Amino acid sequence: MIEYDSEEQRMVLKFVYYGPALSGKTTNLLRLHDLLAKEGRGDLMVLDTKDDRTIFFDLLPFFLVAPSGLKIKVKVYTVPGQVQHDATRKAVLQRADGVAFIADSRRSEAKNNAESFGNLERNLSIVGIGIDKLPLVLQYNKRDLPDILPEEEIRRTWGATGFPVVLSSALEGWGVVETFRALAERAYDALDRRYDFTGTHGLTRGSFAERLVRRAG
Amino acid sequence: MPTDSEGRRRIVYCVGEEHALRDILPEAEAAALLSAASRAGLRGVRVVDPGGKALWGSGDDVPPPGEGDPRRPILLEGEAAGSVVLPAGAAGGETQDALLALLADALTAMAHNNLKRMLVTETHTEVVNRSYEELLETNRSLSASEQRYRELAGTLEIKVRERTEELSRAMARLVQQEKMASVGQLAAGVAHEINNPLAFVTSNLRTLKKYTERFLDIIARYQRVFEQGGVAQQDRDDLRKHRVSLRLDAISEDAGDLLRQTLEGTERVRKIVSDLKGFSHVDEEGEAPADMNREIDRTLSVMRHEIPAGAGIVREFSPLPVIPCRPGAFNQLFLGLVRNALQARQEGLRLTLRTGVSGDRIRIAFADNGPGVPADLRTRIFEPFFTTRDVGKGKGLGLTVAYDIVTAHGGTIDVEDTPGGGATFVLQLPIRRGSHDQIR
């Protein structure tokens, strides 16, 4: 969590889109920006890029107000996927309230996915977050491409971990909102345990997700 | 607080900190825009924070902004981080509205770009600092490991010295064992050779013992007859009969032969013992003048029993000057070379022992007609533990011992081909020591 000011009734949360280079993290945020209603979200801020590759990060902020008056801001970030930007990844991952791991479904990318997931585990432990406590959602992106891992194989691999797995094509615009919603719900569960969203703030799991994920008219 | 792999505390820069408008938009940058707007018709326009507190404005002569005054938000990350406000009573109208919107948008764009630049700068600085820290860390650990290797290198020398001494001692023990084994083989042969004469000497002595009993018997009878005072015819007959029954004539003849044979036997044993003493030079301490021809003969004499009947040993000796050396050691060396030849060829061995003087050196060659030594092994056969024999059939120290004996004397030992096939071991020994130390 970036900030919680109980007097000001303000809470700033952080979600991070993690994953190997070119798996579609920025495309996910672009699609969310397009698909979700203008009310309740800010504009996508894209920091300097090089050859269209993220070198710093992207930011898409969301806003909602709980019935108690608690103003919640959710800052959704992408990390740079390229191996050399590890220090930036750590800075972005710091104090994250939830992570969406965007994997590339193509068979050829299996090794990169695994290395990136290993990097996530290592960096989480460096910034002091336990992976078993962190709300984590997996997205297998690029389902529109040929030669991809079959769904059964993916489910078999990740089934035991209990992490929700969403299949998507960010390019075609499907599976993206579902991923975000799944992440919001997982994050809600963790926050509710700590800040009693339901009792103190009258904010249910359903309404938290609904307010974040409002489809554009 | 997060820690690194070695437990050091480390503050990690966190992307996402919230910023107030004041931190993003310096007054100096906003002031120029505000005063321009004021001149363009927005007289008294101000910027207020979300709490309504005035941040900056043009001129102090206007009243503070009120709730209902016309205002436009300045957005930061999609949120109103403040507003531009026209004070109550300022000129209103469409132009002012448009100007106010324009001002708000301009300040929003300015804040947005400033924020982007700040984030980029912060992240860049963080990355640079982190890289620098990691470099320092790497430098520290490299220095530490360099120190460790230095220490290791220091102790390594001592360890190597210790191990070398240990190995030298072990090697010396093995060489000693090898010499003992060589002597043991000799002893077994010599024992066999001594056993033979010893057996018939013993058997002869037993027979002589019986003969002696009979001689004593007849002497006793003569004694009695003489003591009775006279030699009657009866007594003479009895004594003659008794002499016949004791077969004294026959055994008297035999006893001489037996004694001669026995003496021959003991002479043979004496010779063997003398050869052994000569071979080992057991009575001599250190160096003694020696004729190598004689020493080779001594070696051959103690080896007689080891040399099979079919083997031909040819001595082609030239007279040699007497040289001071450790003859016992050289005999051991000759013994080893003859044995090598015996092992090189089981049947039909012909071993030529040739001696002579060549310049200021004595040259001794042992030429066999065995399989020879391949060229690539010629330097290696003198190395310790090098052997072509099967495991357990030789330690590979025989020629090493030979090499040590010769070099200790200041000489050389080499192996060559025997014309027509076989190996020739050539020893070159300086006649006068000191003059030849350069030979090597």
Image: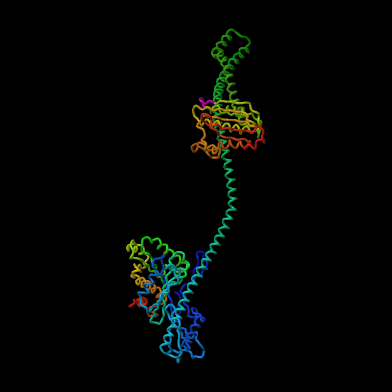
Please tell me which residue is depicted at 58% across the width and 7% down the height of the picture: B233
> Is residue A97 in view?
no
| Badge count | 0
Please tell me which residue is depicted at 58% across the width and 46% down the height of the picture: B164
Q: Is residue A201 left or right of residue B349?
A: left
Q: Position of residue B157 (x, y in %)?
A: 59, 50
The quadrant in which residue A64 appears is bottom left
Q: Quadrant of the C terminus of chain B?
A: top right
Q: Position of residue B48 (x, y in %)?
A: 47, 85
Q: Residue furthest bottom?
A: B89
Q: Is residue A10 above or below residue B261?
A: below
Q: Position of residue B37 (x, y in %)?
A: 47, 85
Q: Which residues are magenta?
A: B308-312
Q: Residue furthest top?
A: B233
Q: Does A11 lie within the magenta span?
A: no
Q: Nearer the viewer, residue B279 or A1?
A: A1
Q: Is residue A148 above or below residue B247?
A: below
Magenta stretch, main secondary structure, is loop
Please tell me which residue is depicted at 49% across the width and 38% down the height of the picture: B391
Q: Nearer the viewer, residue B57 or B278?
A: B57
Q: Nearer the viewer, residue B216 or B335?
A: B335
Q: Position of residue B336 (x, y in %)?
A: 56, 33
> Is residue A212 in view?
yes
Please tell me which residue is depicted at 58% across the width and 10% down the height of the picture: B235
